[in-house]
Image (cartoon, rainbow, N blue to C red):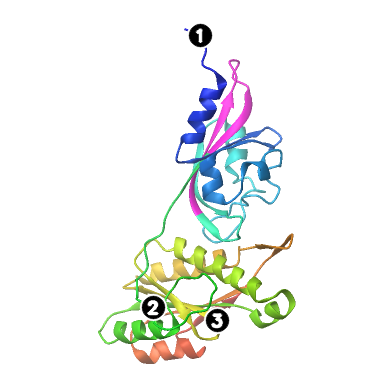
C-alpha cells in the first residue's frame, strides 16, 4: 500500500473540532489548525514561526498563576517524561480574555524513540449559562451583552425576598476614568469585554452576571458552600488580574478589584454593595 500523501494528514488535522498545534524542540510553532484559530483568535500566519513562549497563549492556572515559564508547562513535562500530559488551564485569547481549555501535550517521536516535536491539543471548556433577563432601555454600545443595572437590581430584589444564602461578588476595573483619558473610551470597553468574557467562562455553576454602578459588575451564585465561596473568590481575583488587552501594539493589563461575601439577608448585601462591613472580604492585586 503506498504511503498517504502528507496533505491528507494536514486536511484531517485542519478538519478536527479541537485546537491542535505543533512545536519544534526550540518551541517554535510549526503548525496551527483552524480550530486553534477559532478558539484563540490567532490566525496561523500570526503565530507560525514564533515561539510559543512569545506572548501567544500564556497559559495560567485557575488562580491566575503563569505556567508557561515554569516546570508545570505541559510541553516541558511531555518532553522531559516522554509521556502525554494533560491539565485544565486558562489560555489567553488574542482579545485579552481568558479561556478555560483542556490541554493535552503529546511528544512526537521518530522510529528510534527520539522526540522530534511536540503536539498540543486543546478544547474549550464552557462555563454554565448565566441567568438570562430581558433588557429594557438603551445600553452602552460596548458589546458586553449582559443585564443592565436596573435588571441587576431587579434580580437582587427578587433573589433576597426568600430565605437562602448566595455568594455575591462586586468586580471593579480600577482607574477606568484615567484609562479613558489616556487611551480612550474604547480601551475601557475592550478591558470590560475581556473581563466579562473571562468571568462568564470561569463559572461552571448557575449564576447571574450583570452590570453594576460606576462601571462595575456584579455576580450572584445561589446556594454555595463556604468552601465554594472561598474558591470562587480566589479564582475571580487571580484570573481577573491575568488579563492583558492588546492596544495599539501594547499589552495593557487592567487591574481588577474583587469584593465578595456570603449574603443571607438585605443587611449583609447592603454592607457589601456599600464597600464596608465585617462580612466583606476585599483584596486588591
Q: Which residue is mark 1?
A: 2
The CA span between labels 1 and 3 is 63 Å
Q: Classify mark 1: helix, strand or loop.
A: loop
User: Taking 193 as reference, is 66 above or below it?
Assistant: above
- Which span of residues is magenta-colored? 100-120
Does the CB distance between marks 2 and 1 fall below 8 Å? no
In the rendered structure, find residue 215 and report the number of the disc placed on it: 3
- Mark 1 or mark 3: whose residue is earlier in sequence: 1
Which residue is at a point 27% across and 87% down the rendered structure image? 161
Q: Estimate how packed mark 2 is, as few (under 14), some (14 to 19) or many (20 or more) residues with alpha carbons within 10 Å.
A: some
Q: Residue furthest left?
A: 162
Residue 192: quarter of image = bottom right
Q: Mark 2 or mark 1, which has the lower sequence index?
A: 1
Residue 174 drawn above or below residue 6 = below
Whether residue 61 is in magenta: the answer is no
Instruction: Answer few, some or many: residues within 10 Å of disc 3's Cα (few below 14, many 20 plus, some between 14 and 19).
Output: some
127 on left or right of 176 = left
Residue 229 placement (x, y as % from top left): 41, 71
Quadrant of the snapshot with the C terminus? bottom right
- Name the secondary structure under disc 2: loop
Q: Which residue is mark 2?
A: 135
Amino acid at each position: 500500500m503506498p504511503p498517504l500523501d502528507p496533505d491528507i494528514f494536514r486536511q484531517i488535522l485542519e478538519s478536527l473540532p479541537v485546537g491542535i498545534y505543533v512545536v519544534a524542540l526550540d518551541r517554535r510553532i510549526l503548525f496551527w489548525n483552524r480550530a486553534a484559530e477559532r478558539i484563540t483568535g490567532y490566525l496561523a500566519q500570526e503565530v507560525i514561526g514564533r515561539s510559543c513562549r512569545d506572548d501567544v497563549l500564556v497559559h495560567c492556572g485557575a488562580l491566575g498563576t503563569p505556567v508557561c515559564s515554569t516546570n508545570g508547562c505541559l510541553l516541558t513535562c511531555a518532553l522531559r517524561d516522554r509521556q502525554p500530559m494533560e491539565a485544565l488551564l486558562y489560555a489567553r485569547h488574542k482579545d485579552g480574555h481568558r479561556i478555560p481549555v483542556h490541554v493535552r501535550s503529546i511528544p512526537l517521536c521518530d522510529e528510534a524513540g527520539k522526540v522530534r516535536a511536540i503536539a498540543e491539543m486543546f478544547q474549550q471548556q464552557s462555563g454554565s449559562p448565566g441567568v438570562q433577563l430581558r433588557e429594557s432601555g438603551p445600553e452602552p454600545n460596548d458589546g458586553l451583552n449582559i443585564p443592565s443595572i436596573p435588571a441587576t437590581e431587579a434580580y437582587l430584589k427578587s433573589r433576597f425576598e426568600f430565605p437562602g444564602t448566595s455568594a455575591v461578588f462586586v468586580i471593579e476595573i480600577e482607574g477606568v476614568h484615567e484609562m479613558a483619558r489616556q487611551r480612550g473610551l474604547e480601551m475601557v470597553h475592550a478591558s470590560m469585554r475581556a473581563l466579562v468574557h473571562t468571568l462568564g467562562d470561569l463559572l461552571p455553576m448557575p449564576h447571574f452576571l450583570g452590570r453594576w454602578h460606576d462601571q462595575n459588575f456584579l455576580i450572584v451564585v445561589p446556594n454555595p458552600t463556604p468552601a465554594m465561596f472561598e474558591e470562587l473568590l480566589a479564582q475571580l481575583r487571580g484570573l481577573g488580574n491575568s488579563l492583558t488587552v492588546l492596544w495599539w501594539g501594547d499589552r495593557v493589563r487592567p487591574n481588577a478589584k474583587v469584593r465578595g461575601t456570603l449574603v443571607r439577608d438585605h443587611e449583609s448585601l447592603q454592607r457589601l454593595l456599600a464597600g464596608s462591613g465585617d462580612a466583606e472580604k476585599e483584596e486588591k492585586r
